[in-house]
Image: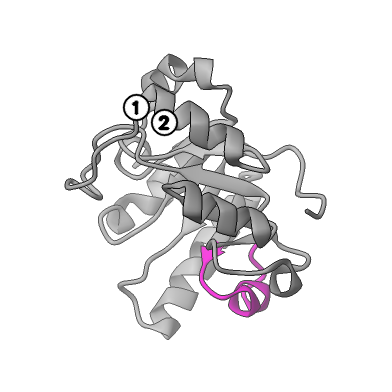
Amino acid sequence: MHQPVKPLPKIWLMTDERNDAVLERAVRKLPRGSGIIFRHYHLNEAARAERFATLKRLARKRGQLILLAGHPSLAQNWCADGVHGREWTRRVTAGLLHSAPVHNVHEIRRANFNGADLFFLSPAFFTRSHPEAKPLNSVQLRRLVKLCDGPVILLGGMKRTRFIAKNHLNVHGWAAIGALS
């Protein structure tokens, strides 16, 4: 694992089409030093690049990191701070902070093998993003957290009070779409 950007954000905003209309306001409301995972898969490449550039300028002013869910070469071309995806290997993520979405032992092992710096573990609670997904209980979460070779961010129905309630799991932080939008 390479040396990630320090300190790593504890609060992360996930973007998608549901919060697009309020993103600028949401980014301004985030604490300094927070992080953003830019997804926006619903846009074509040109519109996605333009939207990313707008949010990146705002994030830079606020001392926030912005990671691109996409290919590492695209993240480098767009001057992202990092890349989000479990499939990328250290060889192609060199120089980028590498976060990985993980939901089970197999995905964690793959992200560990590929050298992820940060693990987004979900679902911690019921979530509108994946209403069919059963949340992981505390025993499952604790077990999966221990398998991650880096800091863990809880995702899935998260908000500040729920992060505090899961503090016994010794995770680094939390991420949300709706609760931060």
Image coordinates for residue 126, horizontal then vertical, percent: 24, 35
Q: Amino acid at mark 1?
A: Asn
Q: Is residue 132 left or right of residue 35?
A: left
Residue 72 located within the stretch drawn in magenta: yes
Asked whether the beta carbons under mark 1 and mark 2 sit within 8 Å of each other, the answer is yes
Q: Regarding mark 2 in the picture, which secondary structure is present there?
A: helix
Colour style of the rendered protein structure: one colour
Q: Examine the rendering and report whether any part of residue 87 can be seen.
A: yes
The front one of 130 and 81 is: 130
- The residue at 48%/47% (across/down) is 105
Quarter of the figure that contains the C terminus: top left
Q: Regarding mark 1 in the picture, which secondary structure is present there?
A: loop
Write down the quadrant of residue 110 in the picture: bottom right
Span colored in magenta? 68-80
| Residue behind mark 2 | 140
Q: Tell me if residue 167 comes above or below residue 8 in the rendering.
A: above
| Residue behind mark 1 | 137
